Image: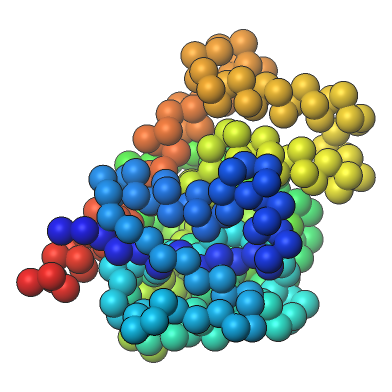
Amino acid sequence: MSVRFLIIEGNIRDVRESYRAGTGVSPAEGYGNVLLGIAGGGSYDILNATDADASLPKGKMFKDYDAVVITGSALNLWKQEPESMRQVEVARAVYRANVPFFGSCWGLQVAAVAAGGDVQPNPRGREMGFARRITPLAAGLKHPLLAGRPVSFDAPCSHLDEVSTLPPDATLLASNAVSQVQAAEFRFEGGTFWGVQYHPEYSFAELAFLIDRRMGALMNEGFFANEAEKNSYVADLMAVGANPSLNHIAWRYALGPDLLDADQRVTELRNFIEIRVKPHAFSRAA
């Protein structure tokens, strides 16, 4: 059995190319590679859903995939730009196809709006680097998406906006002090979405790239006092990502096993694949 993923790329072309120049892959390619690593193989197609001429590969429909996953994005849904609203319509089509559906950060927000929710700028500001003390709620403690997560955990993150209003048919699974909606399940027109506001797919190197790329905004918002401070932080992230046993860096930034251990970091993705994607693939192949 070979699992087939569709990755919906949330970024416009210029951002995709900038990302590829800095990391070697686009966000969708990086996400797809992580999913294949967890699944133990398979394949993925990419839909650049911001593009006006975007389409699935010839002859393919959403129902032909074992899972659809939406990446993060630098866009803002509350602006209602065409590049964003195209993705909302794509998400509605995925719901109707009743395919296992997942998204991180922007992906959660797109799925929320598609199902009747709303997204607005977070009044508490940007959550960048690591989302701290994410706490599963009563529903989350019993939900398979968060199976294996403790009563409080940290995760990589990067976002300015948040789901401000849940869709009518939704279950809130986890929150923290910065964003009420950190994990949720949405149901719409026959389909079910699992998603998180954080980024279980991110490596430390990817997070370091994003922080470096957004230096100006982060300095203006008080995350760093100067460029040297930012450079030191980025270098530390790169170092501990390459060697998680660097205890002095882990101690400096309060990085626990939920962040340093790659298997723990991708908990939600592994749960999604094992609980929803692989059974769907088996049933489709039967």
- Quadrant where the N terminus sits is bottom left
Q: Quadrant of residue 282?
A: bottom left
Name the residue at 31% across, 72% down.
Answer: 65
The residue nearer to you, when weighing 199 against 241, is: 241
User: Residue 5's image quarter?
Assistant: bottom left
Instruction: Judge left or right: residue 90 versus residue 150.
Output: right
Side of 284 where 250 appears, left or right: right
Provide residue 125's location: percent of width, then percent of height.
78, 54
Q: Identify which residue is drawn at 76% across, 65% down.
A: 121
- Number of numbered discs on residues: 0
71 or 220, nearer to the observer: 71
Residue 127 is situated, as x and y percent measured from the top left of the image, at 70, 48
Residue 276 on image: x %, y %:
26, 63
Q: Is residue 135 visible to the viewer in this orientation of the structure? A: no
Locate the C terminus and report the quarter of the image it occupies.
bottom left
**On screen, residue 261 above or below 164:** above
Compared to 223, does 86 lie above or below? Answer: below
Q: Residue furthest left?
A: 286
Coloration of the structure image: rainbow
Residue 142 horizontal/vertical position (percent): 31, 55
Tell which of 279 and 176 is nearer to you. Answer: 279
Residue that appears at 63% across and 77% down: 51
Instruction: Name the residue: 71% across, 59% down.
Output: 15
Q: Is residue 203 something that shows in the picture? A: yes
Q: Looking at the image, is 253 positioned above or below residue 89?
A: above
